[in-house]
């Protein structure tokens, strides 16, 4: 048997050998990210810096109903994700995943805001509006007044829940 001529290779070069199983695991991870992106609301997808081909593929996936076609399309989305910077995508996905630390941190922060808005009143409200200037000022003031009135009259916390829902919408959680 003839020996292969490897004299053109330098001795200092390192070769990283990746097993076929590892490549498959990486592709499966990309498919999981792709399926989470498919299930995501359009408003959240718009916040991500996605390439046009990937964005079109995600839009097209909403029309696919066949199981096998969806599975093939998910493979295509995974292939497109290989070319994409995954860091901002995974950060957003983790912030929306209720089991992640980031989601829990933001959720508890919003609970603290709700409690402060109800208990401290105008001082906390001005701080909140400075932090979230896009929030509807009039609507949040009305929600805070209604929640304070409920606490005063010892009624069930319906307005408090509405206030929390509004805070989540403003935060994007």
Image (cartoon, rainbow, N blue to C red):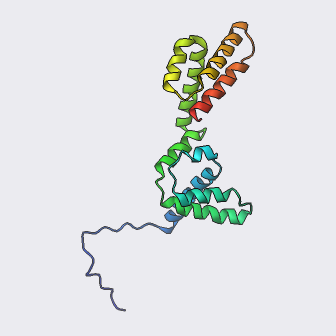
Residue pictured at 69% horizontal, 10% vertical: 149
Measured as percent of width and height from the top left, residue 152 is found at: 69, 7
Query: Height in image: 85 above or below 119?
Result: below
| The C terminus, quarter of image | top right
**Residue 27 visible at all:** no
Query: Height in image: 164 above or below 18?
Result: above
Quadrant of residue 151 within the rendered picture: top right
Query: Height in image: 127 above or below 93?
Result: above
Residue pictured at 65% horizontal, 13% vertical: 145
**Residue 168 visible at all:** yes
* Left or right relative to 4: residue 153: right
Residue pictured at 54% horizontal, 44% vertical: 47
Measured as percent of width and height from the top left, residue 168 is found at: 61, 30
Q: Nearer the viewer, residue 168 or 8?
A: 168
Query: Height in image: 117 above or below 72?
Result: above
| The N terminus, quarter of image | bottom left
Residue pictured at 58% horizontal, 47% vertical: 45
**Which residue ends up furthest to the bottom in the rendered image?**
1
Measured as percent of width and height from the top left, residue 104 is found at: 56, 32
Count of marks placed on residues: 0
Measured as percent of width and height from the top left, residue 144 is found at: 63, 17
């Amino acid at each position: 048997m003839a020996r292969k001529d490897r004299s053109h290779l330098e001795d200092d070069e390192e070769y990283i050998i990746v097993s076929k199983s590892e490549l498959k695991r990486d592709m499966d991870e990309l498919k999981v990210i792709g399926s989470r992106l498919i299930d995501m609301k359009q408003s959240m997808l718009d916040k991500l810096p996605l390439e046009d081909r990937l964005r079109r593929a995600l839009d097209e996936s909403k029309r696919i109903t066949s199981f096998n076609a969806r599975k093939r399309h998910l493979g295509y989305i995974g292939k497109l994700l290989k070319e994409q910077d995954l860091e901002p995508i995974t950060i957003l996905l983790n912030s929306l995943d209720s089991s992640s630390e980031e989601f829990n941190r933001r959720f508890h922060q919003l609970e603290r805001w709700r409690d402060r808005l109800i208990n401290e009143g105008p001082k906390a409200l001005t701080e909140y509006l400075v932090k979230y200037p896009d929030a509807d000022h009039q609507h949040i003031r009305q929600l805070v007044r209604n929640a304070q009135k409920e606490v005063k009259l010892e009624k069930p916390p319906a307005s408090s829940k509405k206030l929390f829902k509004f805070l989540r919408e403003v935060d994007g959680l």
